[in-house]
Image (cartoon, coloured by chain):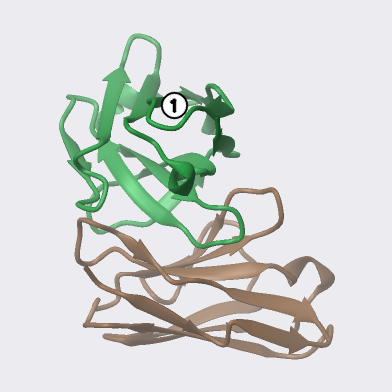
Amino acid sequence: QVRLQESGPGLVKPSETLSLTCTVSGGSVSSGTYYWSWIRQPPGKGLEWIGYIYYNGSTNYNPSLKSRVTISVDTSKDQFSLRLSSVTAADTAVYFCARDLGGNYPFDYWGQGALVTVSS
Amino acid sequence: EIVMTQSPATLSVSPGERATLSCRASQSVSSNLAWYQQKPGQAPRLLIYGASTRATGIPARFSGSGSGTEFTLTISSLQSEDFAIYYCQQYNNWPPWTFGQGTKVEIK
């Protein structure tokens, strides 16, 4: 059974960089079968796809966040990471990592989510 | 970007009754439409993909229909564990993949 687990600081100051890591167990990020995404959900609101990474490092980002987002992968640790720069209170959200088969497929496994609050 | 609009925002249903949720896309997404269930404090769970195919382990009381721009999720007989928020998501035109704003199914 695949399991995804987010980790990282729960509090980030405005203008700083948010950093989260997703650790995959029961599967491998380097399998080449799946794409690995970050999705966020502000408190009480809907879901927003942030971006994905493939095992070879190729990425695709939501145009609305592209200028501030970097997603990277560490295949040796079965981890992928999110960095979101210049954060504001509007970036306060639960951040989920998830996987899909790429392109025209849904997200079939999700992590439990990590709440990140942006506040001074 | 494709905008997904769900209705109603809240649906009040009695246990055992039928629930019908709607999702509309701003342009055709073919059958590349998924439904997710989310309970408080949990991640979304995939229920339906390809507009009408149940994901592994999903009970038969959940069914999806539609194509193009109009989609429906039906829960034939609501159980206590079905009270949750339901999201639709299109994965036909990307980036970005986009979600609806959700329909909350609450106990009447």
Which chain is assigned green? Answer: A
Is B30 left or right of A24, judged from the image as shown? left
Label 1 neighbourhood size at 10 Å, few (<14), some (14-19), many (20+)?
few
Out of B3 and A116, give the one closest to the viewer.
A116
Picture quarter containing residue B82? bottom right
- Please name the amino acid that badge 1 sits on: Gly
Is A74 left or right of A27, judged from the image as shown? left
Which chain is assigned brown? Answer: B
The total of numbered circles placed on residues is 1
Residue position marked by numbered label 1 in the rendering: A27
Label 1: state its secondary structure: loop
Q: Chain of mark 1?
A: A
Q: Which residue is the extreme one toward the front? A: A120
Residue beneath the point at 37% across and 25% down: A81
Residue beneath the point at 77% across and 90% down: B17
Residue B76 in sight here: no
- Residue B98 in percent (x, y) is at 34, 64
